[in-house]
Image (cartoon, rainbow, N blue to C red):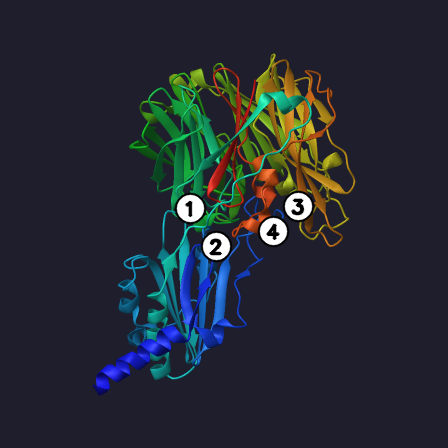
Amino acid sequence: MKLLLSFLAVLTITFSHAKRIELNTISLEVPDIVASGNKTTISLDGFSTYSFTRLRADSTAYVFNYTFKYNNALYEFRETSKADIWEWLENEYKPGSARKKEFKHYKIENFESLENKVLDMKMQKFRIEYNQGLRKLTLIYKIDETTQFMASIKSAFPVKEFLAAQDTLVSMLETVEWNVPKLRPHGMFEQKGEIADHIKHHIVRLPFALSNDFDNPVVAITKDDEVLIAYAHADGSEIIHLDKEMKMKNHYHYDRLIHDIVTTKNGFFALSSDDYNMMRYDIYPSLYLTKHKANGDLVYTQSFFKKDNTKFPGSQTYDYYSRDGACLEIADSIGIVYATSEKRFGISNLVQEGAYKTFSVTTGFLKKGKKDLFHVSHCFAMKSVRHKDDAYLFSIGDNDPRGLSLSKVNLTIHKDSTDTTSFWHEVLVPFKGILGDNYTADSHISDPIVWNGSLYIALETEENARTNHDPNPRSANRGMNDIFLVKCSLEGEDVEVTQMTKTKYIEEANGKIAVVGDRLLLVYNEIKYSNVGLVNSIEEKYMYVNEKSMRETMAEDLNSYYVNEREKSCKMPDSGINRDGNDFVKTSDGRIIWVRLMRNTRQLEVIEIDG
């Protein structure tokens, strides 16, 4: 009887004096005495993914966390559909030599198997820490493809109290519930200007929240005009297959981070890298070429650059600088991989440049024609386009040369020869400034296009491409960027650079171009800053341009579901600077496809523009 009363007393304490707190999709019970006065907070400190220094506060990894002190221990809970938890772990204190003898004070097995259907057997990673009497246990649970939940407990009190606090944490975790947020219907909106009668908007509901920490989506059109979309996150990439009506047809997961996709008759080739946490300067993941069947099954994989392979002279590795770090093209039976890389010459001379390798679509990388033609030093961005048998490779470099460069490779030469006469290189737009000052890290380029025998590319940079001494605390060594349209012949000659936007206190970014009828469509973001350098607003603009790079219309607002989505109703917001979507892709009948992740992270907006 006494035991029963004791058990009932525990139940009374657990349930009568508890309050359920909500993060995003996770809720759990905590003692009522600590719940009052605490609230869910959003962390504003993230890391940039646009380039390694770009607009740090705008490319934020939003974290939902809840922290409180209870019975001589500090508890913290976090939830995110992004990968910031992994990044956070990389920067935390690492346990010292006391780890082994301290291990008995951490009840790891109690957290692996919980009496809770949401978290049971979902523990993905744990970390124990000890430093002069301060103990901490951190647990990470994987809820679905992209959602992570973290629980941690820290105490500087004696072992007995730390062990009791872990039991309390177990009881809290056993109350966890998972509730997918209800999405509000999107209201109607009106589009003005010439594009109004030529644009359609589709909403695609996703089976889980997506992360935009790695990149904007990689989008490709299949041979039957269906759409492949790849989003990368901490544990790989989610590939979404849409039919012609923009309805989800299939979804599959790939364990690596996809940078580019080229579709073929029976599947697709992908360029991908490993190690999510390696996406920052001076860290080197491996880079792979993979061939897939139409359902995503892997046919073969080959390593292009090998992880951390810079220890010996002549070795080479892939260097992830920005989202524009690699691209892929295929012409006939030959393909080309173009990427930023680093190579060591001698004992200490490490050079960061752009390089390419060619491959056969049937046998993989070619033994012949596998030259590493380094030509753009300190390279920050790579884009490419294929026209007939030639691949045109665009780069932004910050050293030798400094500026926007173009290279041309005749792929058919590489079928049976190592002849390099098919390769040439031109500097299209030189940038002023001190060599290697990293200014060009904030210059970006659109996917190039071939139109009426000329090459076109949208360049985002500062007027005169020089370092601006009027500092913006949220930018990297420069003032406000504008959009320039660069046109040249297929031989890299007759270069014309036209400034399409020019504003003193507004920045234009993320330019995209596509041919629509007999004109060029230019779409970009207009970013307005506050007096202290924070982003006040981001608007989307479009204009039509003729073959001579002259405006045919004034800049108009481009309306969309994304623009009109209520940020306040989204529990996991994100900045528009990293939601400008994929570079335009085209269907066989000329329609332009543009894909973006909505702020609620559980829907895609697919914009379709008549060609």
Residue at far left of view: 1
| Dot 2 amino acid type | Asp
Please tell me whether mark 1 or mark 2 is closer to you in this view: 2
Mark 1 Cα-neighbour bin, 10 Å: few <14, some 14–19, many ≥20:
few
> Considering only vertical position in the picture, is 129 above or below 415?
below
Front residue (pair 490, 373)? 490
- Give the distance between the C-alpha atoms of the residues marked 1 and 2, in whole angstroms: 33 Å
Q: Name the residue under label 1.
A: 312
Closer to viewer: mark 4 or mark 3: 4
Q: What is the quadrant of residue 272 in the picture? A: top left
Which one is in front, 460 or 281? 460
Residue occupied by mark 3? 437
Q: What residue type is labelled 1?
A: Phe
Q: What element carries label 3?
A: loop
Which residue is denoted by mark 2 in the rendering? Answer: 84
Residue 145 appears in the figure: yes
Residue designated by label 4: 56
